[in-house]
Amino acid sequence: MEIQALLLGVIQGITEFLPISSTAHLIVVPSLLGWEGPVNTLSFDIALHGGTLLALLLYFFRDLIESLRGDRRLILLLLLGTLPAAVVGLLFKDLVEGPLRTPFLVALNLVVFGFYMLFAEKAETRRGMSGIGLKDAMVIGVSQAIALLPGVSRSGITISTGLLLGIDRVSSARFSFLLSLPAVGGAVVLDTVEGYSEGTTVDWELFLLGALSSFVVGLICLRFLLWFFRGFSMKTFAYYRFVLAGIILTVLWLRG
């Protein structure tokens, strides 16, 4: 079980920031490999997201401190962009965390939003972080709300939306990652409180192991991706999504 927790933490660390959907992998991998127990629960997934959340906080700590001390415009943009996901998450929480967490729907969203990513790569981009306005933040925030659907990829859809708004790839990625801080942080806190109030049993050793591995790997992948986007597009990740969807559908078909 420890190996499973460690591997799922690595998977979360890799897929949280790459535009290939961490939720899809956390649903599909245990399902395909037949993993049961604590590692195949929503509460364990929350612990893994907590690890990558810490990686984000560490990486962008200086940006956030500078915004709080000086121009608070970035904070305003992040709060505005978080509102759509917060509203949708509260209204449809049970649906998103229950019936929609199926391998078939994951595969469907991998394909649909893979094409969205390819389409966005054709957009002309001329603006950087300083050019992101209130309207941009709200539109990107709406796309982040759509990413509550398993298989969409929060980073994939928000970065793509940024490109379609004319924001360059690196700036879209940075804003996407910063925007995930209040959204993911809020979700982790709410789900943790809810689990505690319901008396959910927690295997602390497994949860801490998974969170630690997702934190370390997530920090590495975050640095890699922001370097990658300086010279490369998201097309490779879109093609990966198509391949993964094909594998999921094939396995589901073979299982009958």
Image: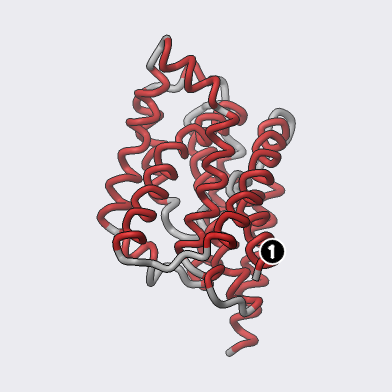
Q: Quadrant of residue 242?
A: bottom right
Q: Is residue 20 left or right of residue 102?
A: right
Colour basis:
secondary structure
Instruction: Check disc 1 and report the residue beneath it.
Output: 243
Residue 229 percent across, percent down from the top left:
68, 33
Task: Residue at 61% x, 39% y: name it.
Answer: 121
Tag count: 1
Pick whichever, 110 or 14, lies toward us: 14
Task: Residue at 54% x, 67% y: name it.
Answer: 27
Pick whichever, 166 or 43, lies toward us: 43
The N terminus - image quarter = bottom right
The C terminus - image quarter = bottom right
Pick whichever, 227 or 127, lies toward us: 227
Q: Is residue 195 left or right of residue 37?
A: left
Q: Is residue 247 left or right of residue 31?
A: right
Q: Residues within 10 Å of mark 1 (few under 14, many from 20)?
A: some
Q: Is residue 166 visible?
A: yes
Task: Residue at 58% x, 48% y: name it.
Answer: 16
Residue 214 percent across, percent down from the top left:
62, 50
Residue 184 percent across, percent down from the top left:
44, 45
Q: Residue furthest bottom?
A: 256
Q: Determine the secondary structure under disc 1.
A: helix
Residue 6 percent across, percent down from the top left:
67, 60
Q: Is residue 111 visible?
A: no
Q: Amino acid at mark 1?
A: Val
Task: Residue at 38% x, 72% y: name it.
Answer: 99
Q: Establish if 153 lies above or below 223.
A: below
